[in-house]
Amino acid sequence: MDSTPEHSPLQSAVAQDPRLKPTPDYGSLGPSSDVHSGKPLHPQPGRLRSIAAITAGILCALPFIASSTARAAWEQFSEYLTLQGKPQPASPAIMSQHEIERLDRQPAQKQAELLLERAINHYEGANDQIAARVEHWRRAHLKLTPHLTALITAALNSNDLRVRAAAIEIDLAAMNLAKVPSNVDVFAKEAESQDQSVRNWALWTLGLLGNRGVDSERVTQILIAHLRDSNPESRHWAVEALGLVGTDETIAPLLQVFHDDPSPMVRERAACSLAQSGMLNEQQRRSAIPQLLNFADDPSLDAQTHEWV
């Protein structure tokens, strides 16, 4: 008995998945084609002349292609784009007026997602658009969907501090948090919660608010107090939040945590906040180098911490 299926797996996949079917743009014949298969296809005279001219041009070029110089040029031309080398823009990284006008017709969620994606890819004008729209998004009940959360995470890992700042603005908007001192009061209280997850979230949110200039000095002092918490998870999130605040006043406590905290995880997060993550700028990070060099010669530090230095 022949057990061969009537259609191969590939044929079945093509039949079921419209993405695998030829599109009318490529002149396919079929139900979706703009070419009526019931009529014979007759090439137009003008098209025949064009084809003849192209063919003649190719034949004339063959002697030149045969030469070593032309062959080398042809090989260089036909080489695929490698992964090494300088960035190669696919298109101008700028928000067009057409795109902005189309954006106006989108719901707030789509606006925030698209603009943050553009900001991550360094599109000129994306951050300006975010700044102009973010307060409206907050009032429009922006949601921390998995997609938006992933974009915020990517933006917070950008090498551009302005993109990280855009992520912070959108994070606050998605939590419907106005940038007012009374919210510092709310989350300072939440940071004392017996529920560890509530405490962690409150510490993180304080860092977001402090970064946007909302009672930053007080936020810093609240977070420094939590560096003495007996729970390493609380200390971890206090460190992350201090890194978000990103002021000069956060550098010394981060250095102290890096040197003294009993938890390797907390020490590592302090090192990351000083070196790369968070909102310290390059000049601020450089200011920590002399103390880090002192740590490199400190015999009281364990081997792991010495590696992080």
Image: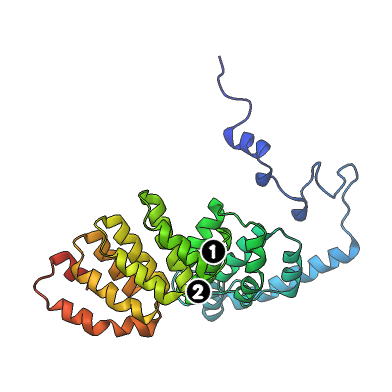
**Which quadrant would the N terminus be assigned to in this image?**
top right
Residue 68 seen in render: yes
Say which element carries label 1: helix
| Scheme by which the image is coloured | rainbow
Which three-letter amino acid code belongs to the residue tagged 1?
Leu
Rendered view: 50 above or below 296: above
Q: Residue at x 36, y 65 (%)?
A: 240
- Disc marking residue 124: none
- Residue 218, image x, y percentages: 40, 73
Q: Residue at x 49, y 76 (%)?
A: 213
Of residues 117 and 56, which is closer to you in this image?
Answer: 117
Q: Are marks 2 and 1 in contact (CB under 8 Å)?
A: yes
Q: Give the residue at mark 1.
A: 172
- Residue 267, image x, y percentages: 24, 65
Q: Residue furthest top?
A: 1
- Residue 152, image x, y percentages: 51, 62
Crowding at mark 1 (Cα within 10 Å: few <14, some 14-19, many 20+): many
Residue 277 seen in render: no
Of residues 221 and 9, which is closer to you in this image?
Answer: 221
Q: Residue at x 84, y 63 (%)?
A: 48
Say which element carries label 2: loop
Q: Marks 2 and 1, how far apart in space? A: 10 Å
**Lateral position of residue 222 relative to residue 147, left or right:** left
| Label located before the other in sequence (2 or 1) | 1
- Residue 33, image x, y percentages: 81, 47
**Lateral position of residue 273 relative to residue 298, left or right:** right
**Lateral position of residue 172 relative to residue 42, left or right:** left
Rendered view: 36 above or below 100: above
Which three-letter amino acid code belongs to the residue tagged 2?
Arg
Q: Give the residue at mark 2.
A: 212
